[in-house]
Image (tube, rainbow, N blue to C red):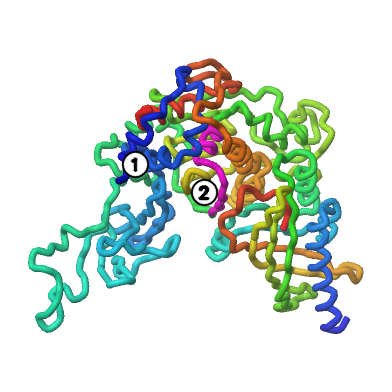
Amino acid sequence: MTPLEVKAAIEELLHAYVQCIDDNKLEAWPDFFSDPCLYKIISRENHDRDLTAPVIYCDSKGMLHDRVGAHRHANVYEPHFYRHLVSNTRILKCEQEVYTVQSNYAVFQTKLDGDTQIYNVGRYLDKVVFEHGAPKFKEKLVIFDTLRIPTLLVTPI
Amino acid sequence: MTKPLSEKTADFSWPEEGVTRAPYRVYLDPVIYEREQQRLFRGPTWNFLALAAELQAAGDYKTTFVGDTPVVVTRDNDGVHAFVNRCAHRGVTLCMETRGHCKNKIITCVYHAWVYDLKGDLKGLPFQKGVDGQGGMPPDFKLAEHGLQKLKVETFQGLVFGSFDAQTPRIEDYLGEKMSHYVRRLFNRPIRLLGYNRQLMKNNWKLYIENNKDPYHASLLHLFFATFGLNRLSQKGGIDLDATGKHHVSYTHGEAFGDAAEYQGADIRSFQSKYQLHDPSLLKSRREFTDGIVLAIQSIFPTLVVQQIYNVLAVRQLLPKGPGACELVWIYFGYQDDDAEMTAMRLKQANLVGPAGYVSLEDGGVGELVQKSLVSADGRQCSFMEMGGKDVQSQPFRATETSVRGFWQGYRAIMGF
């Protein structure tokens, strides 16, 4: 693949990923990851100080499926929609066929009353690998600036 | 003319049923909120300020709040100090960062460069004697009379508490013997700070405290364990209260979760559940305490929670943000002597708690569901809390609201309601 083709494939991965969540197709969400993988939502406050406490921490595809299972069948919360905007995607480096990619994101959340709020803003720090030609997240760090999470977090970012 | 607070709440009275009722007005009324700030948060209570581990070196500081009041907590060579984060000159916020380190162990106001030491005493200010004999402070000006507003500070087992009231009894007396025991149990050796989470809820602070003190809802609102068949067969527990009833511990005995094999077997799964975890490594835990308690939720009046949920150890500091909002600050910790496996387990089990916690995320939302519905409540409507009886006492079971009633008992006493 040429560098431009790689970049296009990684951007498509990022866009398909957020569209999957925004379309509420969470059952397909783990398929964007390799197995094992790392998916971690962590505050910028902790990340910058090398403090490890996460909001969500999954180190296998099974744990991602369990997040979806709890979202669908166990956890109780007000219904809501997400709308992600992703921008400024840059490939920072490539080592041993692992691409380190950073993007900005913003998540708008809309509840059933129709009010939309800026729910969470931050950056993705991803490690992307190609499996049989298809890009997958080997690692996805969601490092958020919005320190005070409004109410609760149940839907992945 | 502003009326005194006592006059503004003259029409307020607690229902005759006492602590089994909480009038909805206490969650809505800005006048009651103001009275809480005065009587409760700036009154004879101990408010959590920091873990001593957050302020390791002389010169370290953090900013926080006691009720609404912004506070700086510092460490110098003599110990830990706290004062209001407000310059004594013109009221400017002194420390803007959440935490930091003061070079030369002084704090300098950005506005007119008044300089304070880390105890909050004013050490100097520019042009005190004027310039070329002109201007400057009047001759009767004394540095010693213009220090920052200080809090009384006590550290207990590595927890730093502050009080605005010089008369507040010593922290161990405030906690009582039983509650001191539970704090010592968790803070039994040097801790390691693991990080923070913060949550903003659009509900009155007392709704979160009630939720935290209410063991009745645990298996009913939080369905994660039941959904995935994780209910233990013989989990025994109960509620311990201090002599005043305003602090509590809800404890559950049990075994630590072992590995995946145990989960697949019958030991954990008490009934045939429809769903199974794909990756039970989430539950891998270690028995840390010899008393066999695996879940211990302790509240320290008014707004501190100290928790052990399996191997996830944390304190939660609740900050009121006006009558209709509050912020919850989670501070996670382990111990200095944790091995790598223990640290990894704490990290993975952190999925259970916090703003996205499998067994805690609902607590962020349920208070808002109450607050939303209260808007139209009239002055006499109130909640109903008679589960487990009508009084306030320790009980060896958890189908009870005794600890919620205990909170209201403490609240009424201090608020004069």
Residue located beneath label 1 in the image: B38
In the visual, does A115 lie left or right of B8?
A: right
Which of the labelled discs sits on residue B327, or is there none? 2
In the visual, does B128 lie left or right of A104?
A: left
Q: What's under tag 1, amino acid-wise? A: Gln
Q: Position of residue B103 (x, y in %)?
A: 33, 70
Secondary structure state at the residue bearing disc 2: strand
Front in this rendered view, residue A32 or A11: A11
Front in this rendered view, residue A132 or B33: B33
> Along the polypeptide, which appears first: circle 1 or circle 2?
1
Q: Position of residue B205 (x, y in %)?
A: 50, 41
Residue at the extreme right of the image, as rendered? A132
Q: Report whether residue B382 is seen.
A: yes
Q: Is B182 within the magenta? A: no
**Chain letter of disc 2 in the image:** B
**Chain letter of disc 1 in the image:** B
Secondary structure state at the residue bearing disc 1: helix
Q: Which corner quadrant holds the C terminus of chain A?
A: bottom right
In the image, residue B349 above or below residue B263: below
Q: Position of residue A143 (x, y in %)?
A: 63, 63
Q: Which residues are magenta?
A: B196-213
Mark 1 neighbour density, 10 Å: few (under 14) some (14–19) many (20 or more): some
Q: Quadrant of residue A20?
A: bottom right
Q: Position of residue B150 (x, y in %)?
A: 27, 51
Residue at the extreme left of the image, as rendered? B139
